[in-house]
Each structure stands twice: as structure tokens, then as C-alpha cells.
Image (tube, rainbow, N blue to C red):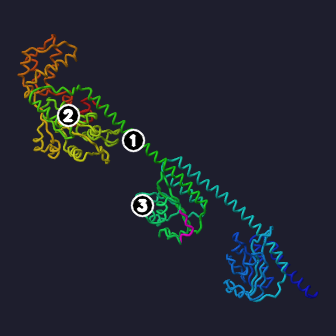
Amino acid sequence: MNDEDNNKKASVESELLRHLAEGTASSTGPDFFRSLVHHLASALGVRYAFVTQCTDKTLTRVRTLAFWAGQDFGENFEYALAGTPCENVIAGNVCYYPNDLQSLFPRDPGLAEWRAESFLGIPIRDSWQNVLGHLAALDDKPLPDKPTGMSILQIFAARAGAELERKRAEDALRESYAQLAKKNRYETIISKVTRAVHQSIKLQDVFENAVEVLSKNIDRADSVTIYLVEGQEVVMKAYKGYSNQYIEQLRRIPYPKGFRWKVITEGKPRYSPDADIDTFIDPATREMGVKSYLCMPIRYEGKTWGTITILSLQRNAFDEEELNLLEIVAHQIETAINNAQQAEALRKALRELEQLKNQLHAEKTYLQEEIKTEYNFEEIIGHSEPIKTVLRKVEQVAHTDTTVLITGETGTGKELLARAIHNLSPRKDRPLVKVNCGAIAAGLFESELFGHEKGAFTGAVQQRIGRFELADRGTIFLDEVSELPLDTQVKLLRVLQEGEFERVGSSKPIKVDVRIIAATNRNLNDAVRNGTFRSDLYYRLNVFPIEVPALHERKSDIPLLVNFFLTKFARKHGKEIRGVSKNTMDRLARYPWPGNIRELQNVIERAVVVSEGPEIEIDESLLKLNAGSKSQASDTLEDVERIHILRILEQTGWVIDGKQGAASLLGMN
């Protein structure tokens, strides 16, 4: 090369250096790369120029950082190096192909598209001489046989390497800040969900809080949902980011459709980076434009209860960090489910305890009422044939659960027979609950028999357990059953047929196992004919009838009964009584006893009270006093009170409240 050629080369290189230096002097970062390729193309007189960065450690792919496309900057692109002229450059070599480029690299379709004839490529290295990318120039016409200004180009390749290193450092710092911000956001999610779990035992509150914080703090999370399994469906319980159209379509998803059911049945999380090729995505979710999703099972006690799902409109939206985060949130929701289950178990236990408390209180009240009346279950005294017949029937029916109807006059001892049947039955360790149907005020029959809920009617200030519920697994004795009103008879019939009823003010059926013994001093056949007693109920009650004989039908038992009552009342009143005179006994045997055994009992107690000697004398005057009125001799205090209340009600025209009402006249608040 002569001096003229050297001078010419130096001039070209100087011009190239000046051109590139002026074009890139004030630029850094992305602007530097754009200026570099623009001025490189201009200085070399070529159509295309670009600078790239390797996208992976294998150095098999690159992506452009700036691309001059002839008249303007083109869109950046990524491509594989295999079969391209750039492959050898990234291997660390300066490559120059002045012509026939397409024939040299027939596997590179981009060369034909650009009509490229020539190529110049220089590797870009970092300060440790590692290849980071390359600087390339292409033209649609041949270049000179020898490259011009190669040393200058290598200087700017080194400058590009420095910019790439700086860019990498900035990217790493930016990524570090992003990761820190992401970490803070994720810690916020965990903190808020954990706080919600511990602040509320309501699952719905926890669900709504979880979808809210996940939606706000996860990048690229376009919608978040929580589903729970209900039978053969998964049901949306909380959501963010859904339009009304898709809420309705996705509110309930039947088994086994979609990826949610796949997660539930397998019990494993599922991440789909590209929903377009996902075969488990449902049509509605696809229609939303979802491109990727993450679905985590919610498990509790070895069973999958539901899912948490995050949907994104971008492909590859999530990574392992989101997967781990969602797993933590799922565990927190599992804790919430456990808390809710324990709270419900506690509420149930408290309800059962309250019911038991109410039942024990009711039993205590009932037993206290029963204690006020003396009962001796062996007080069925007598050897007469009529009473033996009755006792044989008692023995026959006692060990069964058969319904018994006891009939007989007032005062014949129907309740004693009912107690004897109960005490000989397998139910003897459970209560025998007595209900005097004739003593229940009108309008209170259902409450008395079946109980009521708090607020069921005016004055129902607390829940009350009815007599049937109190008698569960025991026996109920319905005395004076003929006094039941017709509407209550219907409900009693249902208990007999189905063993269930509802408390007043409740629609929840209560099942009971109760044996029914009914008693009446009326002729129920007449009541059925008169329309005051249902025939179907009568037939249900009259399964095993027992008729108790009147005292005048068993006169041979009178001496036994007299001696029994003498002993009882002498002990009660602290008197020494040996017996009665023969005249008195004969007189008692002749008397018709309209009030039956109860009347005899009252006469003997009165005689013991007035007796001044060891032997009782009962004259005609004492019996006449008793015979003045059947009701006077036979009625209990309960009967007298009932009759008095009914008379007052009739007197006031059944007006209860007010100064002239029955409550005021009876001295009741």
C-alpha cells in the first residue's frame, strides 16, 4: 500500500470516527444504541444496522436493542443464531462477507427478505471479554473486498459493551428493587390475610379479604376467585375482576368441567402459562381472554374444599413466587376453615348445653310439681276380681310400647294405673310426664304440649320445652284427654303417627320417642258422635283399653283400702289409730261412694284428723257432708281451681285484661 492509499484510508477512518463520535457522544442507554446503529449505517453507507444482546447463557439466541431498517428504526426482534451469519460473530469472531451472503447462509430466511448481499459483524464483549452480543451491518449490495475502519468499529463495539454492562447493572438494580417491592407486596398479602383469619371466624370475611389483597398486590392478576365445593358443583364465594356477564356464567361449575375440578380431584396446584393450548380451560374463561392462570387447592383434614384461582390476560404471567404465595394464602384459608369449624362445633355444643339446661330445668320444675302431690305407685290396693282383671291387663301391656287408653269414673285411680304401667315398662328410668288436659287454659294447649320458641307469641320471653319433648324416651300421661281442642287433636294424631312435631313459632320438626297413656272419665264414643273428638285419634288411642271399676263395683276391697288409708294418715298426723269399729266398717261398705277411692281417702283423712281415740268412728253426718256434692268430695284442689277460673271467665265474658277482666278478679298479674 503506497502513501496515497494510506492517507486515503486514514481519512476515511477519521471521517468514520468523527461521524460515529458526534452521533453518539451525548447518548447513553437505549438512545446510545439507536444513535449507534443509525450513524453506523450512515457512515458505512449500508441499508441495515443493528446491535443485539444475547438472551440466554447458551448464546444461541439474541434480541436486538436497536435496529435501523433503511429509512427509520424498525421494531426490535429476537431470533435464533443457528444458520445465520451472526452465529460465528457471537462465537467471538469478527466476520465480513462482502458479497454472495444469501448463498453462504441459505438457512437464514431473513436474508432473502432483506435482499441482503453483504454483512459485517463485530462481537460486543464485557470487561472480562465475555461475549454479550454483537454489532452488525448489512446491505442489499456488495461491500468493498476489504472492510473500512474496522479498528474504529471495534472501539464503538467496546463502547457498546460498556453500555451493555451498565444496562445490565441497571436492569439488575431495577430487578432488585422490583423484587423487593414484590416481596413487600407479598408480605402485605400474607399479613392482611393472616390478620383477617385471626380477626373473624366468618369464612366469607376471610374469603373477601383474600381476593381483595391478592388482586391489588399481584402483578398481572386480572381476576381472583375463591370457589368451594357444594355437592356436585363448585360455587364462587368471593371474586375480584369479573364482569357481571362472567360472574353469572362461572358462579356455579358442575362436576367435572374445567381446570378447577381437575385441581380439586387431584388435590394439586395447576399453572397454565399458555391457556390457548390448555385443554382444561372452560369456554367462559377462554372467552374472557385469559392467557394464563394459577389454581391452588384449599385442603382441610385431607379433603379438598375448594380452590383459589388467579387469572391473567397475559401469557407466562406467573412464576414460582406466585405459586408459593398462593400456597401460603391457601394454608391461611385452611386455618380459617378450621377456626370456623371449631366455632360451629362450639356453638353446637353451647346450643346442646342450653337445650340440656332447659330440659333439666323443665324436668326439675315438673318433678317439683309432682313432689307436691304424694304418689305411692303400690297404692293399687285390692283383691276383688274386677281389680285383679285390671292388674292382669296392666301386666300384659306394660312391657310393650302400645298406646293405652284408661277409662273410668273420677277418683278411681287412673293415674296410679298409668304410673304402674310406666314403672313396669323398659322406659321406667325415663320420666313419666303427666299432662292434665282439663287444666290447660284455652290457647295454651300447643305451647304446653309441644313447647314454643322465644318470641313465638306475646309473653314468650324465652324458649320453652314442651311436655312431649320432656317425655322423650319416656312416657306421657294425658289425663282428661277428651278436653283437648280439635286443632290440638290433629297435632297429637301426627305425633302418634309420625313421632314428630314442631314447637310453636318454629318450622323445624322435632322427633321424639314417647309412649302415650291417655285417660278420661268421659265416654269417647259419645264425644266422637258429637263431633268434639276426632274418630281417627280415638282409634289411635284406643289400641289397648283398660276400664277401671268404680269403688261400688269392688266393695270387697273397701276394708283393705280403709286400713291402708288409716295407717297412712295416722302416720302423717302423728296419731295412734288401731282401726275402725265394725259399725263404721259396715256403714262404709254400704255407702255408694260416688267419688270413688278419692272420696274414701278424703273421708278417712278427715276422720283421722277429728279422732280423739284409738278407734275411728264415722257416722252418717260425716258421709252426708261428703255426699252433698259429688264434685265437693272427689275434686282435687287443681279441679276446684279450674272450676273457679272457668266461672270467673264466664262472668267476665272471657275478657282477660283490664280492671274488670278475669286476671284482675283472680288477683293475677
Pointer 3 local density, CA inside 10 Å: few below 14, some 14–19, many at least 20: some
Q: Is residue 32 visible?
A: yes
Instruction: Out of 394 and 576, give the one closest to the viewer.
Output: 394
Residue type marked 2: Ile
In what element is the residue under mark 3?
A: strand
User: In terms of sequence position, does the residue under pointer 1 or pointer 2 come before the other?
Assistant: 1
What x and y, as percent, mark residue 210?
54, 55
Q: Which residue is mark 3?
A: 233
As drawn, 396 above or below 107: above
In what element is the residue under mark 2?
A: helix
Q: Residue furthest top?
A: 613
- Residue contact between numbered discs 3 and 2, judged by CB atoms under 8 Å: no
Instruction: Determine the residue positioned at 78% across, 83% down.
Output: 96
Which part of the image, by quadrant, shows the C terminus?
Answer: top left
* Location of residue 570 by image quarter: top left
Q: Which residue is mark 1?
A: 351
Residue type marked 1: Arg
Range covered by the magenta-colored residues: 270-276
**Which mark is drawn over residue 421?**
2
Residue type marked 3: Glu
Callout in the foreground (1, 3): 3
